[in-house]
Structures are given as structure tokens and as C-alpha cells.
Amino acid sequence: MSERRATTANPLLQLDDLSIGYRIRGGIVPAVRRVSFTLEEGDSLGLVGESGCGKSTLAYAVVNYLGRAGVRLRGRVLYEGQDLAALSGEALRSLRGREIAMVDQDPVSCLNPVLPIGEQLMEVPMIHEHATVEQARERAVAMLGEVKLPNAESVMARYPHQLSGGQQQRVVIAMALMGNPRLLVMDEPTTGLDVTIEAAILELIAELRERHRMALLFISHNLGTVMRVCNRLGVMYCGELVEEGEVREVFRNPRHPYTRGLLDCLPTFDTDKNTVTLKPIPGQVPAVPSEAPGCVFAPRCQFVEEPRCTRGEIAAERVAAAAHHRARCVRQAELPHWEPAQSIREAPVTPALSPEPLLRIDGLDKSYEAAGVHWFRKGKDGGVHALNGITVSAAKGRTLAIVGESGCGKTTLARVLTGLEEASGGTIRFGDSDLARTGVNRRTKALKRAIQMVFQHPDGTLNPSHTIGFTIARTLRRLASIPAGEMKRAVENLLQKVNLPAEFSRRLPRQLSGGQKQRVAIARALAGNPELVVADEPVSSLDVSVQAAILNLLLEIQTASETTMLFISHDLAVVRFLADHICVMYLGRVMEYGTVEEVFDPPYHPYTEALLSAAPVTDPDAKRRRIVLEGSLPDPSEPPRGCPFHTRCPRKIGPLCEDTLPPEHRLPGGHRIACHIPLPELQAMEPVLTRSRAEAGD
Amino acid sequence: MARFIVKRLLFMAATMLTVSILLFGLLEISPGSVATKVLGPYTSQEQRDLWLEAHGYFRPLHVRYLDWLGHLVQGEFGESIRFKVPVAEVLWPRLSNTAVLGGLVLVIMVPFSLALGVLAGMKEGSPLDRTISLFSIVTTSVPEFASSVILAALFVFYLGLLPGTSTMASGFSWREMVLPVLVLVLYDFGYVTRMTRASMVEVMTRPYIRTAVLKGLPHRRVIFRHALRNALIAPFTVIMLQINWLLSGVIVVEFFFAYKGFGSLLLEASLNQDLFLIEACTMVSVLVAVGTQTLADIGYVYLNPRIRFS
């Protein structure tokens, strides 16, 4: 094999003016337009962009797997100088898995559910190198060790569904490495994983890439994740590679207006709603055009200049003073230098005084019976305690954010608040009423009106066969008792409130984009002028530019009508931007509660510290302390004794943590931390994220 | 797994018990109508009472039910009114005849339809897929009473190759089996083929198939190792349902070819209000239905590690 690996003059991977389209009834829709880049041995290129920009198509083009509908319209994909499209099926097959390996998103669907893990790993060397069963087995066990799965031997015999999401992704990565590939293509490998798991996987990818000297093509919608594993960054928009260069260089000196737009959309860790506004990119991502009438970004670009930007073919230009930095913009050299977080607000959004709490949750418990009721074993296995003694409050007109990994009880809390579930214990004071044991059917109309919810996936909450106008009008009729004559105006008012044109009332949900649907969902929640809006991950399925617009909208509404918001999210940067108070939950318990500043600065709960360290950051000058949590979230039906976090806590102090539930440190101002570590020690912690120009380049 | 099997078996027993109660309630609860059916409509009340007394029909209801159930479990169904012999003597030979017919149909139909379904589903929309799909739709949409007539006309009257009846009057004959088996296979294979095809098409679009291809595995291995195991889970349940169908769905074919099987027995029992024979046939049908369903459930769990190890 060594002669096969001899270095040649050709780059490992070269995309040469590549355009790809998909055949549909009545023609071809383009997906990727004239993309060129090269990837040398050991290089790592991260491709980012919003959905529909052609990232995944490009990834599959590199492994020459475009399906029957995919067509290469022009250009070539060269692997070591060989055109992949010209290879025979057999030659291509021997390249796949051995030279070029691929890791997809959603690991559970990428593993064959009926075959044991071991078999799926072992077949790679057995097919490609005719290894014997013993050799293949040995290699598989070693590889599972390398991706840091404990008990590799027992993992071999297991089936995919018996592993957690993070473990499955480690297996998929191990599988990709089984053939010792020289090029690894990863398509959103950490999407859908919890932040702490994502951080551990990214760490692993970076380490393995280094050790195996692989080239990496890493596709992601998240700019922060690319920072962690790649040395180069490519920004895609509308099928084109609009900017490409060294990661830190691009983040520090973005030359393409779209890259700037993306960075302006992102909340960062040193900004919040009182200091900056997010700047969403105006308009929507258009369909990839087949002919190039100038720059694809021109209709949305604030720097557009007729006719230079709207005529002819725009070529990628070298950015001066940087070796490998290119931008596909005719004005790239003229644009002013980009500064992060430019628009400083004059006045804070929220008033400084601390108002009355509108919502007071005290000692809230919620437990579920174990699935599959056994009459004769009743009371033996107690089921799942989804919430345990939750005590938090939310001030009127403020935002309380709930953060934590999946399974921490965030959504259960939202369901109890909105009455979809009844609590098993504790109280929820909301105005004069106790909500804890009042299911939605027993709530008065006024109470239902006062508490409304916005869900993660607007698709699932809008009836596909009703027009937007009908959906909103029905809610208005139910909650606001508006006379029929004024209904039309009321609907239009609400649409205007969420920045949608009035004519949208005649549209059906399928005619709207994801962000527009979420606006409709918000409009519906606002129909009855609620006092409390419970928003469960309202922006996490949206692209960053849409996310920024929705966050701005939520803020506007909150300032205008003093709505209290319970904002559930796993994205700490978003929470940092939007929230006033934060409650960090783990396995149904509150680990830390306080104002944004209190939670994001030391003293931290060790779990908060780990979450902060795991959060993706785009600031090239940010320095973080790396804390990688080992293992995955314990099964919520069998939570660990003592402190629930002790099984993964990097700061565990000893058997005390395993046996006794930690006490709450109560600091002046209401900051609470549930931990055994003495307070002075917690206060002596270093901040996780620091920003310093001087140490840049690390 | 063992626990699951025990659970399924208990469930099966419970179903059988429920059916037996229903059956008893429907057919045996009023002694008067039993006597009328057994002795005929032109008997006097005294004769009927005497018969009822002799057969213990004046005992309390639950005693009668338990007694009836006890006999049923031991295979003592009573005497057939039409055949004037114990029901068991007619039932078992007929049942085994149908088992032979159904068994032959399964042995031919299952491998044939699975293979065709997999071939069609491997590449959706290919000429092979179109051909197989069309063929299976056409054969399935011709009902068995029509195909019996057509095939009999062709092979018996026009070509004169095969006998038109399958009475097995002079012992078992393969030649007499051909037409009934052919009719049933033609009617049924299209259904299983289409189910298999749908399942295969679905599996082929799965990300794990893409993963297997991108691992550089040969096409053969992708199909046999990765796709087949998953694609055969759904058709398995369908095939188990066919066993059930073959027991009672063969009435037309058995009657048409004068084959002495369970289906034609069922028909005769119903036409003659042969009370005890109907009871026996019902219980046997339900037993087979519940039994195949239990087997299907167990097999499904066995084939599906996601359920087996959860």
C-alpha cells in the first residue's frame, strides 16, 4: 500500500469549476455553481452556509454519490489528479472507504439497525484489504478504543440502538477510519447532539485528524464548530463558494458581505440585548440561479453597486495581504474593515429596576409512571422523576432562560406551565392562581389567554390545510373575543406585529419559509395579549440569519408589551443575548440560577462551566478553558445517587458527591449554586472564556 | 426473549378462551335450539327434552360451559349431524389435506415472491421493477374464481394436460394438485411481492445503505448483508397472515376442484347447520389465526434487534 501513498504532484482533492444540478420533471435545477478549491494532505476545510446553499451536494460530489437525479453540469472533481466521474464502478468502489471516507449527520440512521457494531466495522478491512476475521476484529477493537469508547469488546457485540447518540457518532467515525482514509468528508457530524457531546466529538475529530494526518472536508451550518476542527473556512451562499481562507483570517477580516452578514447575525458571549442588536440579512436565500446575472448576493447586499455587481460573471479575487484568502466580490478590496457588534444601543432594552415576579415556581416535582404498567409490581420501580424541587421565578417583562442538555427536564417544565401536564408536587404561582395542579382543561379562558406557547417546529403546529389568516382568526376568536367585523383588521395587525405583510393571511403554511412560519406561530401566541410566553427552542431549527430576525422580533414584542418570557434553549450564546435570568438544569434539578452576568461569570456550577466551555464560539480571539465531559447523560429513570452530576463532573470532590444531594450556596442578589464545593473555591474559578487580542494566533 | 414468548402464549390462551365463551354464548346458550338442530325440526318437545336431559343440558350454565370446554380441549367435539360420525374423524383428514395444499402453495409462493420483490425493489423505477410490478398487479387482480375457470379451460379442456377435479379418489396425485396450487399461488404471490418490493424500496433509501455504499462495499454485499435483513422484516408478518388466509380463503378453490379440504368442509358444515362441526371448525380456525399471529410477533421481535434488546 505504501507505493499507493507515494506523494504526487497533484493535490489530494481538487474541485475545478464544479457545477452540479438535480434533474427534476421539466428540467434541471442547479445546486452548486462553479466551485473551485483544493485540499492538500493534512488540510482541513470547513464549509459553512445556510440551508439550501449546496453544502451537502458538494460533500456527496466529493464521494461521487449524487443519486440518480444528480448531474454534473460542468467542471471536475479530481482526487490525486484522477477525475472521479471517469472512474469505473470498481475503481470508485476501491477508493471509497479506503481513500475517501464519509461521516454523515444523524448517526443512528447511518448504522444498520440489524447488524452488530462489530460486524459493521470489521467488513471494511475484510473487503478492502482481504483481512482475516481476527485481524479485522483486532483493528475494530483498537479503533473503538481510539474513538474513546469504553469497553470496546462489549460495544462490538451491541446493536446501534443500544448506544447513546454520542456513542453512535463515535462508532460512525471509527467506521470511517477503519480503512485508514486519506480524506475524510463529514457532513454536519455533530448536528443533533447535545453541546457537551458535540464538544467532545469535535475534540476527538481534531485529535484523530492530527494523528492520522488526514485531510478533512467538514460541512456545518455552525460557524463555531468549524473553528474547532478546521484551519480553513469556506463560506457558501446560493451554491457558490463566496469566500475562502484561513479560519481566523476570515473571521477577523471577512471580505464578502455575506460572511459579514452571517457574523452580524450571531449573538456572541460578550454581547447582550442591552448593548447590541442583531442584524439579520434582509430578504431570503433565493433558489440557486442557473444563469449568473452578476453576484448572487447582490439583491440582499448593503454594499451593492450598479452595474458592477449585477452584470457579468463575478470571479473569486485574492484578498490582498493574505496568502490564501479569496472572496467572490468585486468590491472586496474597497469595503471598510469589519468590526464585530457595531450597533451599540443607546438605551438598555429592559428597565434597570427589578419588578415584581410574575411567575414563582416553588419546589416543583413531576414524575412519570414507568412505561408498561404492571399491576402486580406497582410501586416497585418508581418511574422517571422529570422534575425535582424546581424553584425559580420570572420577573414581569423579563426573560427567564432554561438551559440544559436533552433529558434535563426543560420541556417537561414548559408542559407543566402550559397545563399540558400536571405537576406531582410543589406550586406555581402565576398572579393569583396556582398552576401546578391545574391542567389546561381546568384553566379559565383568561388563564389560557395569559399563558401561550411557541414551539420548536412551527411546521407541526400549523394546520397545513388552513390559511394563515384562518389559523390566526380562530385563535383570536377563542382568546380575544373579537367581533367578526373587526377580525380582518385584527389579523392584519397581528401579522404586522411579527413583520409579515397582510397578504400572507391568504397563504397556506407550505407557501411560507421556516422563519415565516415561526413568525406566524409567534403571532398566534400573541393573539390574546399573553402575559407569559413559553418558547421551547423557538429558533433552534432556523438558519442563523432567520434566527437573528426572530430573536429581534421577540425582543421588540417584549419591550413593547412587557411580556414575560420563559425561553428554553440549548444555545448559550442566544441565551446570553436574550435572557435576564438563567436557570441551568441537569436531570430534572436546578444546578444554578441567577442573572445572566452571575451565571456567565464565576463562580460557576461545574456543569455550567462545562456547558460554557462546550459552546461554539466564532470569535477568533476568544480563549477558552477546555473542559471535556466524559460519558453521556445518565438514564433519567435511574438518576445517580447524591449529586446527579457526579458521574460526569470534572471537579468531583469525593464520596460526598456520590452520597449526598448538594446544598445550595445562596449568594446575595439571588444567585444560587447547588454544589458541594465550598463557595470560596467556586469563587476562585477562572472565567471559561476570555478575550484578548494579545494572545491571538493561538 | 423467553419472557416475551411466555407472555405471547398466555395472551394467545386468553384469546382462545374469549372466543370459546363467545362461541358457547352464540351456539349453545339456548338448549332448545341445540336440540332442534341436532334432532331436526320435526321432532316433538318430549323427544328434545329427553335428548337434552341425556346430554346434560339442564345443568347450570357454567357447569355446561366447563364441561363443553373440557371436551373441546381434548378434541372431543361431539358427533357430526351430517356425516353421522364423531367430528374429529372428518375434521383431521380434511385439515391435513388443506395443510398439504397450503404448504405447497407456501413453499412455491414465498421464495418466488420474495425474490421478485427484492429484485424489483432494488432499483425503483427500473424496467425490471416495472415488469415485475405490472405482472404482480395483473395476477393479483384476477380473483381465484375467475382464474380457476380460465386455467381449467386452458389446461383441462383446451390442452387436455391436467385433470379438472382434485378429488384424490385413487390416492394422492401430484397431477391433481397442480391446478389448485397454481390458482392460489397466482392469486397470492403478487400481494407478497408488492409488500416485499415496497419494503425493499424503503430500505434502499435509508442512510445506512448509503453508508454501506460509501464504505466501498460491493453491490452484492450491500444488498445481501445490509438491505435484505431489514427489508424482510415487514414481509415476514404478511407471510404469516397468508397462512391464516390459506386455511379459510381456499373455500372457492377447494369447492371448484372438488378437493376434500378444510374449506369445503367449512362450507358443508355451514350449509347443513352442522352445529358441532361448525364449533370445531371455528375453534381450529381461531387457533390457526392466533397461532400464526403469535409466531409472527415472536418472529418479528427475533428479526428486529431494536425490539429484541430493549
Image (tube, rainbow, N blue to C red):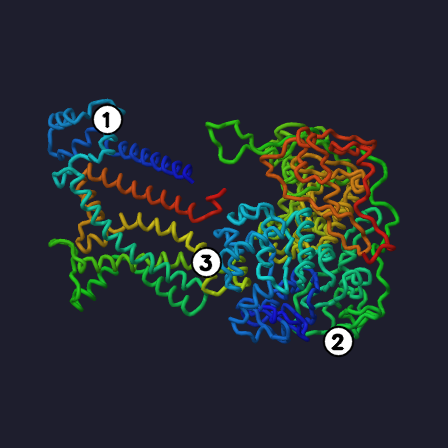
Mark seen at residue A399: none
Q: What residue type is disc 1 on?
A: Arg
C-alpha gap between disc 1 and disc 3 = 57 Å
**Chain identity of mark 2:** A
Dot 1: few (<14), some (14–19), or many (≥20) neighbours within 10 Å?
Answer: some
Of the two numbered discs 1 and 3 on the same chain, state the one appearing first in sequence.
Answer: 1
Q: Secondary structure at mark 2?
A: loop
Q: Is residue A68 above or below residue A160?
A: below
Viewer-closest of A374 and A415:
A374
What SS does tag 3 mark? helix
Residue in front for this viewpoint, A610 or A32: A610
User: Do the residues under discs 2 and 3 have CB atoms within 8 angstroms?
Assistant: no
Res. A447 in view: no
Tag 1 residue: B64
Residue A608, percent across and down? 74, 41
**Disc 1 sits on a residue from what chain?**
B
Describe residue A181's horizontal placement relative to residue B81 as left or right: right
- Alpha carbon separation for disc pair 2 and 3: 54 Å
Q: Is residue A356 shown above or below B99?
A: above
Q: Give yes or no for contact between labels 2 and 1 (Cβ–Cβ under 8 Å).
A: no
**Nearest-to-viewer mark from 1 and 3:** 3
The front one of B153 and A201 is A201
A221 or A541: nearer the viewer: A221
Percent coordinates x, y for residue B233 in the rendering: 42, 52
Q: How many marks?
A: 3
The quadrant the N terminus of chain A occupies is bottom right
Q: Which of the numbered marks, if any, corresponds to residue B225? A: 3
